[in-house]
Image: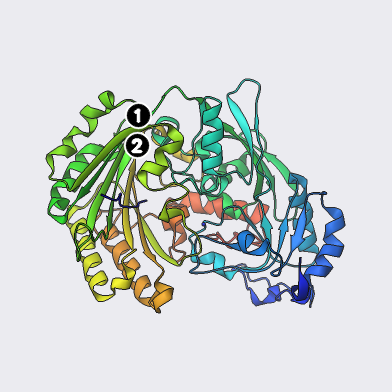
Amino acid sequence: MTRFSALVACGLALFQPLALASALLPRDGYQYYTRHNLTVQQVQSELGPLLSQNASIFGPNDTRWENATERYQMYAVPDIKMVVRPGMEDDVAIVVKYANRNSIPFMAKNRGHALTATVGAFSGIQIDMTSLNQINYQPDMKTAWFQGGTYDDQVMVELWDRGYVATTGSCSCVGMMGPGLGGGHGRYQGLYGLISDNLVNLNVVLADGTKLRVNESTNPDLWWAMQGAGHNFGIVTSFELKIYPANIESWYYRNYVFTQEQLEPLFEELNDFHDRGALPGVVGGGYVIYGMNKTVDENKAILFASFIYAGAQADAEPVFERFDKFEYVDRQEGNVPFPQVPDVQGSGLRDPLCAGGKTHITTTAGLQEYNVTAQRQIYELYNQKIAEHPELEATRVVMEGYSVEGVLKHDPKKSSFGHRDDYLTTYFDVENPADYGLQDYALEWAKETRDLWNLGQPEPRRSQPSTYVNYALGDESLEMIYGWEPWRLQKLRALKAKYDPLNTFRYYNPIPPATNHY
């Protein structure tokens, strides 16, 4: 049976003018103005000589444009006027200072997997980080320096070949630092924590072009902010990250396909399996997806369940055998090296989940355990919507459950990541509704699903729902995204006023600066 896929030269364009930044009114109330009719050719002549030899500046007619501006998410697309591709890290600060002198908005991009609709407010220069992709190992081999353009598959493969691993995201195609600035969930988090928990040093370019080394003892307030809300504070040109010996030779996976008759007993078993955050770190986790597979059922979604264990099958068997008691349509298993784990779980480079250039309407909710009634309601709503609009059959409902043992070892007060008590992360995705004029329909469905997840939680989480910043739609409250403790958001807004008072970095689930601070 086919595995159910699981779980972003210039020609006439030389004279295409940059849109006025004054069209963008940030939350801080400032109005910005830019030079009129600034063309790619002008930027090349003015900025080009200031950059390194391998840097490049190009517009829409350049053969590199399509790849450079392609995004995973096409629901709310930034208006890119031109691309500047730094050839070395120092170029980034030069670009930022040039943009500031000319009041041109700028935004850094690596792999382009931002899901939030807030990026759609951007119009200006894209700083393309993809050429900054070097990895340099420290002599003690306890850490390595990664440039800002590195991405998961590259890192997993290169480190594995050297006998090491690091905390990465779960999809091979996603950049390292994008998720890391918002925490960064992944299969190694049960053992080592989030991506952000493993950071040692950051090289950061601030909104005014200042270059800073940021760590626990140097600029410690910014260090705190960058670990969970970093998209709001600067561009990371490189970062030092802990690496670990790859002592686990292979990972065991077990995938199931179930029909809806198993839904209630499966989620009851999953609640016992996850045990409200007590899943051992060696268990990479398990997730379930609702999605269409017409070879199994023409009209109703199937349940695809995938589990992963850091070790041999014999060690994993006692952990996963509990799921064999449910009648399944298909069951697959095996052991693979860590870099191949995304491939067997449906999040590899060549899987549909990683395909770019599509519209996605997404919502998310953080949970502590599954409300089985809500899971049934979400399932029935899925079938109802697909029956009404079968063209949306690529829609998926994802329930992720990684071990949080390593995440919970870190003091929640020591970083801006505010949701360490989310033991489960959900993700709803309507794919390509724009192709059928169904964006409003998809948005309503996405919000209904999110509400069912949140209303199914006990208080206080029902009235104080949480949102993983990297999965956010963009309509959530700041408290939902960054945490409900009043001190946490107050501190973030004060730091925003200190490091980015003009709210330059306002395109990724933005935090407005405090107006009465500094």
Label 2: element kind? loop
**In the image, what residue occupies the spot 64% across and 33% down?**
217
Q: Quote the CA–CA distance across marks 2 and 1.
A: 8 Å
Given residues 318 and 475, the one toward you in this image is 318
Q: Is residue 410 visible?
A: no
Label of residue 31 in the image: none
Give the mark nearer the N terminus: 2 vs 1.
1
Locate residue 376 relative to residue 36 in the image: left or right: left
Q: Residue furthest front?
A: 1
Give x and y (percent) for residue 491. Answer: 55, 50
**In the image, what residue occupies the spot 22% across and 34% down?**
320
Residue under label 2, please give it.
Answer: 403
Given residues 350 and 284, the one toward you in this image is 350
In the rendered image of this protein, does residue 187 appear above or below residue 123?
Answer: above
Which amino acid, mark 2?
A: Ser
Locate residue 148 relative to residue 94 in the image: left or right: left
**In the image, what residue occupies the spot 40% across and 63% down?**
362
Given residues 365 and 326, the one toward you in this image is 326
Residue 138 quadrant: top right
Mark 1 and mark 2 in contact (Cβ < 8 Å)?
Answer: yes
In the rendered image of this protein, does residue 171 appear above or below residue 309?
Answer: below
Label 1: element kind? loop
Q: Residues within 10 Å of mark 2 (few under 14, many from 20)?
A: many
Figure quadrant of the C terminus: bottom right
Which amino acid, mark 1?
A: Val
Label of residue 282 in the image: 1
Residue 321 quadrant: top left
